[in-house]
Amino acid sequence: MRKKVTVVGAGNVGATCAQELARRDYADVVLVDIIPNYPQGKALDLNQAGAVLGYEPTITGSNGYEESADSDVVVITAGKPRSPGMSRDDLVTTNEAIVSAVTKEAVRHSPKAILVVVSNPLDAMCHVAKALSRFQKNRVVGMAGILDTARFAAFISQELDVSVKDVTAVVLGGHGDQMVPVVSATNVGGIPLEELMPKSRIRKLVDRTRFGGGELVGLLGTSAWYAPGAAAAQMVDSICLDEKRVLPCTAYLEGEYGIEGLYMGVPAKLGAAGVEDIVKLRLTPEEKKMLRASAAAVRDVVSVLKKK
Ligand code: APR
């Protein structure tokens, strides 16, 4: 039987994620948005693209949740994106209300789903989705690490003029400017990055990664969508196909990495049950310190939430 995936928010990120999933051809996709006719129009366009590209899932657009019933995975991209000058954290109150409403409705119709949260500020919105759904921690996971890691890997590949396929990069922590690119675990074709580049160059790429989202907001006037949409689809693949990939995800930590009761970016095994394991990387003392600072920044945003 085909899988069923609902993507809430048919805007830039949601529609890109839906398109990526449609092209995989293993799941029917439901796009939900509050704007009348908008998700229906996107779904019609995506279905017609299937005739050109040769995929055949049913893509349905809706302003309600009936069509989304019994989804295996619900991806939440509803919410406001950033405008120039805004941090992700500036969105907290607006997007808390949106993600709360969306989570309630989505889980009422799909009580067995796994939730993949994309709306920002990501770590805090995972807390909202977990609180409102009352799901176990393994069934609520956030997308940020794949995107942050992809940015770091892309910068490294450009700098060294090597295929991005051979760059293994690791970024942990919150999805904010205090994220932690883990240089000690980053390598190219098995060679540690620190042997391939002077420290000063690495520092520049680390900084560009940390502010990678802001660089795009500056160029586009809104936040990015191709890489975020593709990253969310990769997580859906691993869950729906039970791939058990180890991917950087925003998962609920209860003591791992010395962090208690907080959503943070860590390497996690993603499979049919959602987050099936959290992988513990050995970090340098400096990286541990940065991770603690990142956790403190996430806690500040979480403390603003009405419901945690
Ligand atoms: N229910 C359903 N859809 C909603 C709701 C709601 N309550 N509120 C807003 N939306 C929809 C909007 O109508 C819009 O179509 O969410 C969509 C968001 O799309 P965009 O404005 O294009 O934003 P996008 O770039 O996709 O970013 C969405 O993902 O990466 C994050 O920071 C980003 O929080 C932002 C989210």
Image (cartoon, grey):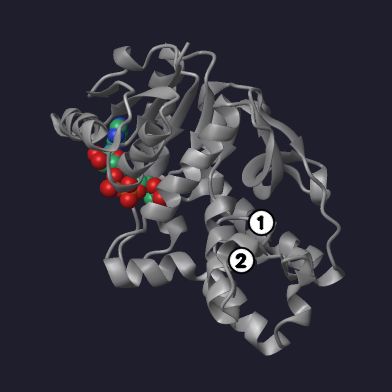
Mark 2 residue crowding within 10 angstroms, few (<14) / some (14–19) / many (20+): many
The Cα atoms of the two marked residues, 1 and 2, are separated by 7 Å
Residue 103 placed where, x, y %? Answer: 44, 26
Q: Quadrant of ligand 1?
A: top left
Residue 178 falls left or right of residue 125: right
Check disc 1 and report the residue beneath it.
173
Residue 83 against residue 225 in the figure, above or below? below
Q: Amino acid at mark 2?
A: Gln
Nearest to the observer: residue 48 or residue 143: 48
Residue 166 against residue 48 in the figure, above or below? below
Q: How many marks?
A: 2
Q: At 79% across and 44% down in the image, what residue appears?
A: 279
For the question of whether residue 34 can be seen, the reply is no
Secondary structure beneath disc 2? loop
Q: Amino acid at mark 1?
A: Gly
Rendered-image quadrant of the C terminus: top right
Name the mark on residue 96. Answer: none
- Quadrant of residue 23 in the image? top left
Q: At 81% across and 50% down in the image, what residue appears?
A: 257
- Residues at badges 1 and 2 in contact (C-beta under 8 Å)? yes
Residue 195 placed where, x, y %? Answer: 78, 81
Residue 25 against residue 306 in the figure, above or below? above
Check disc 2 and report the residue beneath it.
178
Secondary structure beneath disc 1? loop
